[in-house]
Image: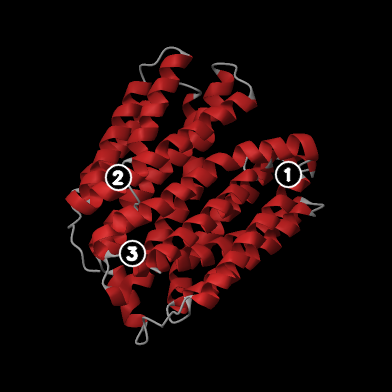
Amino acid sequence: MIQRVIYILSAVIFLLMIGSSMTTPIMPIFLSYLGAGEILIGFVISLYGLVRAPLNIPLSFMLAKKNPFKSAFSGLVLVVLAALIMGTSLSPIQVAIGKVIEGLGIILYVISALRLLAEYSPIEERGGTMGIYTASLLLGSAAGPLIGGFIAEHFGERNVFFTYACMAGLTSSILYFTGKTVKYSNSYPQYSTRNIRESLKNKDILLASYVISSFFIVRIALMNVIMPLILYNNYGLKESIIGTIISSFWFITTIPNIIGGKLGDRIGRKFTLSLCLSGSSAALFAMYFTRDLIQLIVVLMCLAVSTGISGPMSAIIIDLSKREELPISLGVYRTFVDFSFFAGPSLGGYLLDLLGANNIIYFILSGYLICSLVLLHFVNEKKNY
């Protein structure tokens, strides 16, 4: 039963991330077609992270006594609605409404899925089982842009959103029938606001969450903003080639992620996260010295390996949490991570505006990760749950 739940959650996140990431390459084009300027385009896209970040903790508290299968199903239904709204939008405001609903639906699913993963993963195998889930997420994120670009080119941008709605509908059906066949008992009958205070006072969770979010900020800034523009402006690559390079990056991270999860079970997650930060910092430092496209791609693929070796980063938060505080601890963690979806593009855009498409950007990002690595050593690693 445990393995079945893990595999079903992994299949759901794989399909959901394919659907979600299908919209990534076409969203700016679609908004521009609807009459949005650059500033409005950036704002609408950032709504996804802006909506999610402040809602993590209150929703985690509200859902603590609910059946997570039902909460996750409700989130997926909202995603279906959001995709249909975006696909039928006639103005940027309607797309913005869809992005808000999508953000709410995704956060409901993610909060519930992380809780289920924590409860159904044996502590001695947590990194390995959660690594399967994270690898599925990364594979879906990598495949989505390729599929979305193909659909948009041959069938039109609106059909990307309708396909997204169909995939979200399929995942909601899978989760609905799973919830009907898996018996789940409420694990937090005595949950109270005291649990919120205790979680917010846990410096190890706060510090680990910040370190992980800083890594996400760097990765999102690099892969979503900086790298596409440098490949386009400095090397003259076409959009399809850029998309292939970026998708390859995400594909390569999947195997190291599974290995990193199993390694973290044996020698500690702080160690694997340290490997990730130090290796990623070294790869970014090496990028500073690249002088041609081949060198850049080789180092970028090395960065993909070091990125994946961290294993599932949420596992360290679960380890640091007491059972009765787990939902809020995960809410704190997701707040930091979701903020990175806003801060990452903002940082990437600021650095490009300040420095241009210059290799010095890699050096700055490398130094940022070194600072995060130093902070990580102040986290007291222990397993409370």
Q: Is residue 130 above or below residue 140?
A: below
In this picture, residue 269 sits left or right of residue 40:
left
Residue with the mark numbered 2: 260
Instruction: Identify the mark nearer the N-term, 3 or 2.
Output: 3
In this picture, residue 136 sits left or right of residue 373:
right
Q: Is residue 56 above or below residue 179?
A: above
Colour mode?
secondary structure
**Residue in the foreground of this view, choosing between 97 and 239:** 239
Q: Residue furthest right?
A: 90
Residue with the mark numbered 1: 31
Instruction: Pinpoint residue 97: horizontal percent, then vertical percent.
Output: 69, 60
Badge number at residue 121:
3
Instruction: Pinpoint residue 281: horizontal percent, then vertical percent.
Output: 30, 32
| Residue type of the residue flagged with mark 2 | Gly
Residue 30 falls in image quadrant: top right
Instruction: Identify the mark nearer the N-term, 2 or 1.
Output: 1
Residue 243 in view, yes or no: yes
Instruction: Pinpoint residue 309: horizontal percent, then vertical percent.
Output: 31, 41
Residue 333 falls in image quadrant: bottom left
In this picture, residue 303 sits left or right of residue 232:
left
Label 2: element kind: helix
Q: Residue at point 30% right, 70% down?
A: 199
| Residue type of the residue flagged with mark 1 | Leu
